[in-house]
Image (cartoon, rainbow, N blue to C red):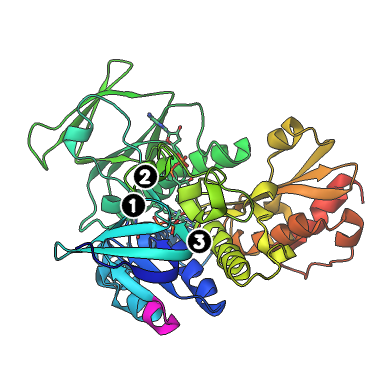
Amino acid sequence: MPETPEQFDVIVLGAGPVGENVVDRAQRGGLSVAVVERELAGGECSYWACVPSKALLRSVDLAGEVSRVPGLTAGPIDADAVLGWRDYMVSGYDDSGQVGWIDSTGATFVRGTGRLAGPRTVEVSTPGGGTRTLRAEHAVVVATGSVPVIPPVPGLAEAEPWTNREVTGMKRVPDRLVVIGGGVVACEMAQAVRGLGASEVTMLVRGGGLLGRVEPFAGEMVAESLRERGVTILMGRNAERVERPEPGGEVTVHLDDGTTLVADEILVAAGRRATTADIGLETIGLDGSGPIRVDDSMRATAVPEGWLYAVGDANGRALLTHMGKYQARLCGDVIAARARGKQDDLPSMRDRADALGAPQVIFTDPQVCAVGRTEAQARADGINVRAVEYEIGNVSGAYLLGDGYKGRAKAVVDQDRRVLVGVTFVGPGTAELLHAATIAVTAGVTLDDLWHAVPSFPTVSEVWLRLLEAYGL
Ligand SMILES: Cc1cc2nc3c(=O)[nH]c(=O)nc-3n(C[C@H](O)[C@H](O)[C@H](O)COP(=O)(O)OP(=O)(O)OC[C@H]3O[C@@H](n4cnc5c(N)ncnc54)[C@H](O)[C@@H]3O)c2cc1C
Ligand SMILES: NC(=O)c1ccc[n+]([C@@H]2O[C@H](COP(=O)([O-])OP(=O)(O)OC[C@H]3O[C@@H](n4cnc5c(N)ncnc54)[C@H](O)[C@@H]3O)[C@@H](O)[C@H]2O)c1
């Protein structure tokens, strides 16, 4: 006899940071929620991405800062201690704290791999080999995140390359590392591995620059800094073939210019794809070949009756934890409102931030902090643009931070509305400047109003004043 499905108002597939936030908001909205997780509650972000990568970078970043301050010398970094700090920050890869938090919300945590089995139904294969069938009265929310893309280079998959999981979880620092990619993961991890003691780190960058989605000068400044730290960056170079005859032994990478590199490990940081291929989307007429398209309330556009939602990396809007969590908050609220027949289109219930351009901090030294559009994007969008730039090192607050401070700021202005549509800061210690820019871009604060937001002397924030002056105020 088929078992009776367990009934919930909402089923969330995936308990990463994004799924957890849907749980929180839907529970607060008075709905019963089940959340299904096949690995660790907390997701990629907590154990193999944001948290461990920033834990590994912290001492490297601080050593760079100390080296710029006269009278201080950074001692050698104790890599084992840093790896221990990383283990602490990921709670020893134990999710009992996060599961305890989910329990405390009143939601039902279900450990296992979930798959859609027709409309509103999720089948969970549990670790003990059993199956549980869950049925949602109101909504199923896909929050399954993303997985790394392994390019189809002959021999690469067989060489068991490192991905974000192995590099953030490394037990010891490899002496020689080859990195495929020039994006965010590649830059942050090249800096960490080199800073923690690798003697050779070589990046293979298929295009002509690093960090393709931000202003070009940001990639150039990060490239210069990585080179100064001893990282080799091969621009326009591709791996053609990879060999690792002995599992765990040396890796040989054959490049497209006929040369070879030999390393202890090879890290693939070539982008990610949404985890949608194996979650049963075909049972509801979707193909699972990419991110799930959603409207601004996170509802899947291709599903009749509107019971399927997708948030975070799974919808492909912005592969960033804070953006996924923002989507999750509004998604949980929208589902609760719709379930109760309440107004579901309050201003807080639609995604505006992704279209404006998600804020992002890249934790290299220099940090790269950007929100809104780049100048090129703004022009392509038909905005009447004028961009201004300023060397952050000329601001008193920056040069007081240490000798040879290098940084640059750029503001992209919509001349017709006299508002900022994009801001980029590149420089040490600029991460905390970004939120002011995010507020200005999101709220459409005019330059004439910004003029009255007086930055304190001597802080790096005085760069705001200099940008306005560069524009002509
Ligand atoms: C190295 C690295 C560093 C990063 N650093 C930052 C950073 O500093 N700041 C930032 O904002 N972003 C960062 N990111 C991006 C960030 O990690 C992601 O945007 C974020 O994790 C997305 O959250 P999510 O909940 O959508 O997905 P995930 O964190 O991937 O969680 C999805 C969860 O769903 C589960 N799941 C998947 N399929 C199923 C299934 N069928 N059944 C049950 N459970 C399932 C998974 O096990 C996982 O726990 C980084 C990414 C990487 C790779
Ligand atoms: N600090 C942060 O906010 C942070 C940190 C790490 C990751 N993330 C997020 O995680 C996501 C994934 O990061 P990522 O670095 O893997 O992706 P990415 O999209 O930033 O960079 C991918 C890189 O791989 C290269 N590439 C793609 N296919 C290739 C191929 N076949 N051969 C060689 N090179 C190839 C691209 O040219 C690019 O340089 C990003 O979207 C990012 O937003 C964020």
Q: Count residues near mark 2 (Cα–Cα under 10 Å), then give few for <14, some for 14-19, many for 20+.
A: some
- Tell me the CA gap for discs 1 and 2: 6 Å
Disc 2 is placed on an element classified as: helix
Residue tagged 1: 117
Q: Position of residue 152 (x, y in %)?
A: 29, 27
Q: Is residue 283 above or below residue 72?
A: above
Residue at left offset 68%, top offset 64% = 344
For image coordinates 34% across by 65% down, the residue present is 134
Q: Quadrant of ligand 2?
A: top left
Q: Amino acid at mark 3?
A: Glu
- Decide which of 181, 58 is in the foreground and name it: 181
User: Residue 470 at x, y = what percent?
Assistant: 84, 46
Q: Please state which amino acid type lies under the numbered disc 2.
A: Thr
- Give the residue pinned by disc 2: 283
Residue at the bottom extreme of this rendering: 104
Of 356 and 169, which appears nearest the observer?
Answer: 356
Which amino acid, by three-letter code, is at mark 1? Ala
Q: Earlier in the sequence, mark 1 or mark 3?
A: 3
Q: At x 63% / y 39%, what residue is drawn?
A: 215
Q: Is residue 17 visible?
A: no
